[in-house]
Image (spheres, rainbow, N blue to C red):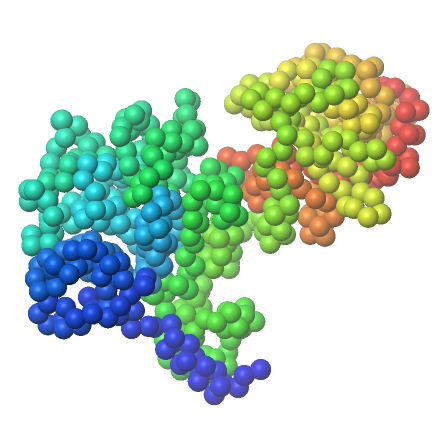
Amino acid sequence: MMTIAEMLVEDAARRSRRDIRYDPLTGRGASGERIEVDTPVEGMPRAFVPVAMTADPQYALVRADAVAWNRLRCRHDFDYWCATCATVKNKMTGVEERLRLNAPQRRVAAVMEADRLAGRPIRLIMLKARQWGGSTLIQMYMAWIQSCHRRNWHSLICAHVKDTASGIRGMYSRLLESYPETLWEGDEAPRFRPYERSVNIREIAGRGCRVTVGSSENQEAVRGADYAMAHLSETAFWNATVRRTPEQFIRAVCGAIALVPYSLIAMESTANGVGNYFHSEWLRCRDGRGDKHAVFVPWHEIEIYRLDPPDAAAFAASLSAGERAMWEQGLCLDQIYWYRRKAAEYSCMSQMRAEFPATDTEAFLTTGRGVFPHDRVESMRRACVASAVRGEVDAAGRRFVADEAAGCMQMWEEPQAGSAYVVAVDVGGRSESSDWSVIAVMRRPSASRPAEVAAQWRGHVDHDLLARKAVAVARFYGNALLVVESNSLESENAGGDSNLFVLERLARDYGNIYRRRCHDSLSGRPGWRIGFHTNRSTKALLVDGLIEAVREGSYIERDPRACDELDTYEQLPSGAFAAKEGYHDDILMTRAMALYVIVSEPAAVVSEKLRLPPPL
């Protein structure tokens, strides 16, 4: 372990490496491949410019003309263009000033520049932390393309509400109002002008580029236009409408943007929990399965989150275990001290981590009442396969019929000879607005393999049809033990006699069905009833078993939506368990029931269930 004196020496070395000298005007410390050259600009005899600039055929023609040289540099050097042409409002001081890219902005810009220089379409999904200018960067990059590279190159700015999109376009207005006339490459003075009396569309005078603003609340207003670039802001907060989901809307917009150089799609948002479209798209792209570069900026990369301790030696000696872990990860003492001071504003560390995340997983945390450890859920998520075969089991339970368009059942594993399965059913509602009904198939563990999700049906259907479907799935998987959550079917408010009929049908049509021991109020003797009845006590048993399974890794998950539900499951102040408001737990409960039965009803005694008396 380092001594305090050694830590202070190491801290100074880390700061010197971290705080590189960056000057966007001379190009020192700027990103990209650069070369030092002589310049015709007064007061700047030498500069580090992009290699692409010196390779431009016009470079030899402008070496003695300061204005032409600056224009050419603006076309090739985004850092330089920002520092000379782009004006933004400083969030810390409120003062209008030229844009000097900070470290996170330079890193993200380098990602987009790599695509542009390679002649690829520019595609980006960005998970934002706070106060580092992610939205500003995206908008300025689009403005740079429209001001210096492309004419008649139309763009869309779409946010969760129109005021946010208008605010983003307001950055563009300030830029055009203060754009240096000598560097403007348009046929008219830089400004926005109305376009065909539209309140949502402006045209950049002299460039022919249109800029449209819109929101997810009014999707029809931005459809059908000729966009080459799209800035989709705060997409985690986009609400679904009766006619269109965020996913459908984004696909409709992005699908019309051609796969050509300089086309751009940038999706950015702060996190808003898991299970929504932005979270799913982030995971897809982060894991290399999507079309976008996934970029996350941790809190410690943001330059304003630093504070020098009054006594560095004393602070180094006082580091907690968590703070020492930050030190071991390479952070400097001024970053750790800032984190300590900021964390004092929050009642628990989970709130601090959600506001100032160090990883993308922390960014998606939304509550301190989570039941399942997020690191374990993330580990389970890596085994998930979203692209399972989709279809339906036929009514007789003899074969699986593939139907990618309309099938509600996903199959990750066909029935295996020598394997035993449990089929768990969580009963939902009939309408599209109600909870889902879920039929989950789990393969029982063996000496060499843990339990594993094999298939899943999820949809809305009448309860009698759900019962038939569950029986068919159980038969298809080798006459598996069928476990049905019976609350909805036993409740008088859920359908009365018709639901009792469903239970009777299950008892008549399928023998290998789970029955629970209960007390018969009429005879005074113990008896048996079909299904698993969930109340506060039995639900705690289910959840406790699932917590253990997740922690110990004793089952393999295949559906990423199950991981989403695990991440949004809470223990309320009352002690009860429930899904976070606005989320579901239907898939989760099927896992809990299946695992409970696997532990409490080993395969060796399953056959005994066939000889139990019928339900009372």
Q: Is residue 213 above or below residue 495?
A: below
Residue 290: x, y in percent? 48, 42
Q: Is residue 60 above or below residue 363?
A: below
Q: Is residue 551 left or right of residue 459?
A: right
Quadrant assignment, res 506: top right
Q: Is residue 15 left or right of residue 580?
A: left
Residue 586: x, y in percent? 62, 32
Residue 279: x, y in percent? 48, 42
Q: Is residue 167 left or right of residue 401?
A: left
Front residue of 472 and 151: 151
Q: Residue at x 20, y 70 (%)?
A: 37
Residue 176 appears anywhere in the view: yes
Quadrant assignment, res 312: bottom left
Q: Is residue 478 left or right of residue 203?
A: right
Q: Is residue 505 above or below residue 232?
A: above
Instruction: Point out the image quarter for the N terminus.
Output: bottom right
Q: Residue at x 23, y 36 (%)?
A: 154
Residue 96 appears anywhere in the view: no
Residue 616: x, y in percent? 85, 19
Q: Residue at x 11, y 36 (%)?
A: 193
Q: Residue at x 74, y 31 (%)?
A: 414
Q: Is residue 465 above or below residue 570?
A: above
